[in-house]
Structure formats: structure tokens, C-alpha cells
Amino acid sequence: MTQSTLRIFHIEDDDGDARQVKRDCTKEFDTEHFTLTRVDTIDAALIALKESYYDVILLDLNLGDGRGLENLQTIKELSPDSPIVVLSGHDDTKTALDAIRGGAQEYIIKSTNNSRHLGLAILSSIERKAYERHLYQLANRDELTGLNNRRAFNNYLRPWLIRAARWQRTETIMFMDVNGFKQVNDTLGHDVGDLLLQHIATTLRAGLRASDMLARFAGDEFVVHLDAQSHESVEISARIAEKISALFEKPVLIAGHKIKTSVSIGIAFYPEHGEDTASLIKSADKAMYQAKKDNIPYVFYKNTDEV
């Protein structure tokens, strides 16, 4: 982001305070270096944030249609990637700390604010949020494939299972292993193996919907949470497993080598095959090994007492 593209979103129901913020921004950034969009209600903010992205959000905690820190939580949930600077009339340490713990990058007391203070707060909040995103990427992304890693998948799945328990829903997990990958590593080298894994990750992503969560679990293992309604989980998981298998029917050229590979897929359902993340993935993993053993594309997990 550069100054010429700085997009500021201001949520403020006091016209005087809004005019002051505009004057301060103009003084710090000059009119050609920023755009300022202002709304005066949380409802209007929610509509605007669904339609556009802003580099920073300036938020008054006390609005006519919202209440205190609830406003912050509402905005953060809708626009998690935008840094938030709270502008408050309350000179209260506890509120300020609660706001920071709640996800705000800065807390400014209106009575002590000036243009320099606001300008620095805006720029520092943007930089801090960017660093936050960088740290998140390091902790939750697989460096080789760019996919989510095991930590990210487990953190993602946990709240899905909590909601599924509450609403008595079925959740679907697919566990996949690359067939013949060790042979590629042993005969062609790890560099080719890495390129193959990148190709496989791209191919798997192409076989899924945008709402499905794909992660590299470990080595040549991948795991997926399918976004499917309970009554269609079996049908959709089978259809997607077949689609993924079809994508691997033809050999691919990797670093000058024609390589034919495929994936074995195991499918498990919450809560029937596991009531927590670890047990559900373990069931899908067992089904995957059965698919590999039977030399078929995919297998649905079966409890031993079901056979």
C-alpha cells in the first residue's frame, strides 16, 4: 500500500467529530493521498464493508445503533483483515485494554487527539496489521505448497465441530495420500518431489469448491473439510473424490520427467466416525489406507461393528 491508495473508513455518528477527523487526515496525508468514507451507524458500516475493502477503519465505540466493544467485535468479524483504530470519548484504561485485546490496533482518546497523533496511529496500525498477517502466514501456511498447514486445519475444524454438535449436523473429512511419491523422491530426487507436491496441491485445489478447506497435513498427505449439508454429505464427497481421481488420470511433465501418480482418499463423517478433530482425522486416515490396500480411488470409513 502507498499513500496514494490509502482508503480510510470512518464510523462516527457525531458530525463535529467526523469533520475534525477529516481535517486531521487532510493535514497529515493531503487530499490526493487518501479517500475518506464515513458512515454514522453500524448497520451502514456492515453494508459498506461487505461491498468494499479499506486499508484502515476508524471506529467510534459508542454509536446510536451499537454498544461499546460489541461494535468492535461486529466490525472485526466482518472485516478481519482491516486494522481498526478506536476513537473514543472515554479516557478509561480498562476500556482501552479491552479494545486492544478485542482486536483493535490503536485506541485514541478524542479529547487528547491531534492530527499528528491520528496520522501516526493510522500508519502504525496498518503496518502492525501487515506484520500480524505475516506472522499468521508463517505459523499457518505450508511453505512449499502455499496451502494451509496442519495447525491451521485443526484450528479451522474445531469450531465447525462445535457448531455441528450444537445443531446436530454432519461434517465431512477427506484424507488423501499420494501414491508412488516415495519412488519419485528416491529415483528423481527431492527437488522433483517438491515440484510434484506443488502440482498435486494445485490439482487438488482445482477438484474442490472455493468453500472447501484444503491443507497439507504432512509429507505427501493432504486433508480436506468439505462444505456439505448433512443430507448430501455422502453424495457430494463421493462426487468430489471421483472428480479428484479423474484429474490424476493422465501423466504430468515435471522438470522434464513424465510422472504418473494418483491419490488414495479416505472419507469420514462427524459425529459417526469421530467426535473431535483427532479422532475424525484418524478415521479418515484409516479409510485412506483401506483405499490404498484395495487399489481403489476412495473408501468411506466403517466402524468394525458395521462390517
Image (tube, grey):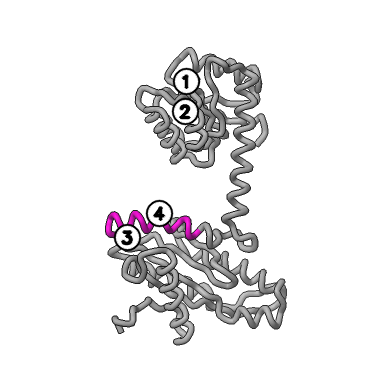
**Residue 217 in sight here:** yes
Mark carried by residue 95: 2
Estimate the spatial distance between the alpha carbons at disc 1 and disc 4, rounded to whole Å.
34 Å
Tell me the crowding category of disc 4: few under 14, some 14 to 19, or many 20 or more residues within 10 angstroms, Cα based.
Answer: few
Q: Where is residue 120? Give x, y as percent.
A: 64, 26
User: Mark 4 falls on what kind of element?
Assistant: helix
Give the residue at the far front of this rendering. Answer: 94
Amino acid carrying label 2: it is: Thr
Which residue carries the number 3 mark? 229
Label 2 secondary element: helix
In the displayed orientation, state which residue is furthest to the top. 16
Give the percent coordinates (x, y) of residue 7: 57, 30
Check if residue 242 falls in the magenta segment. Answer: no
Q: Which of the two discs, 2 and 4, labels the residue nearer the N terminus?
A: 2
Q: Main secondary structure of the magenta part?
A: helix
Residue at the spot of label 4: 159
Q: Nearer the viewer, mark 3 or mark 1?
A: 1
Disc 1 and disc 2 in contact, CB within 8 angstroms: yes
Label 1 residue SS: loop
Question: Looking at the rendered structure, which numbered label has been put on residue 90?
Answer: 1
Q: Residue at x 47, y 18 (%)?
A: 89
Please state which amino acid type lies under the numbered disc 4.
Pro
Which is closer to the viewer, label 4 or label 3? 4
Instruction: For marks 1 and 2, give the CA distance.
Output: 8 Å
